[in-house]
Amino acid sequence: MRKDWLGVSVIALSLLGLPFILPHIVEDFARELTRHVGRSPGGGAFLLGVYLAFQSLGLVLIASGKRAGFGLTFWIGLIWVAGALLIHGPLVWRGGFRGGWLSLVWVVGLVVTQSLTAALAAWGAWGRRGRAG
């Protein structure tokens, strides 16, 4: 069996983002960010669970050799990055990000890992030739 290094790389990068995503999201909930975007904490937690389930589904589909997994993982990664940049980008740019350097590490780690995930997933979904799925 031929090893799909692109698939393995996308899965690894997506999973590598979790140690940045989870503490960042916990901090968002502690600061009641869900209320600022019109959601209750419970509603926000439910939506986060659904979102992480879709992220997991994308990775399972990639591991199963399905091209659709790359497309789903691309969109999930892109939304993580866009959300982080839109919500937190202005604070980071001004240099006064809320919780100090550790909070900054979490959001930068999220943006870097999910940007790379989305880029490689796009290649897997639309850039490679000869793979069915």
Image: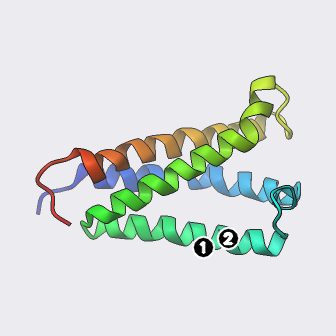
Q: Residue at x 44, y 47 (%)?
A: 117
Toward which corner of the image does residue 1 lie, by quadrant?
A: bottom left
Q: Is residue 122 left or right of residue 55?
A: left
Q: Whole-percent x and y of residue 62?
A: 32, 63
- Looking at the rendered structure, the kind of residue marked 2 is Leu
Q: Is residue 103 left or right of residue 68?
A: right
Residue holding disc 2: 47
Q: Is residue 25 left or right of residue 125?
A: right
The outermost residue toward the top is 94
Q: Residue at x 32, y 54 (%)?
A: 8
Q: Callout 1 environment at 10 Å: few (<14), some (14 to 19), or many (20+)?
A: few
Pick whichever, 44 or 12, lies toward us. Answer: 44
Q: Residue at x 84, y 70 (%)?
A: 40
**From where the camera sits, is residue 103 visible?**
yes
Q: Secondary structure at mark 1?
A: helix
Pick whichever, 60 or 121, lies toward us. Answer: 121
| Residue at mark 2 to residue at mark 1: CA–CA distance | 5 Å
Q: Are marks 2 and 1 in contact (CB under 8 Å)?
A: yes
Q: Whole-percent x and y of residue 46?
A: 70, 75
Q: Callout 2 environment at 10 Å: few (<14), some (14 to 19), or many (20+)?
A: few
Toward which corner of the image does residue 123 lie, by quadrant?
A: top left
Pick whichever, 102 or 48, lies toward us. Answer: 48
**From where the camera sits, is residue 15 visible?**
no
Q: Residue at x 75, y 68 (%)?
A: 44
Residue holding disc 1: 50
- Looking at the rendered structure, the kind of residue marked 1 is Val
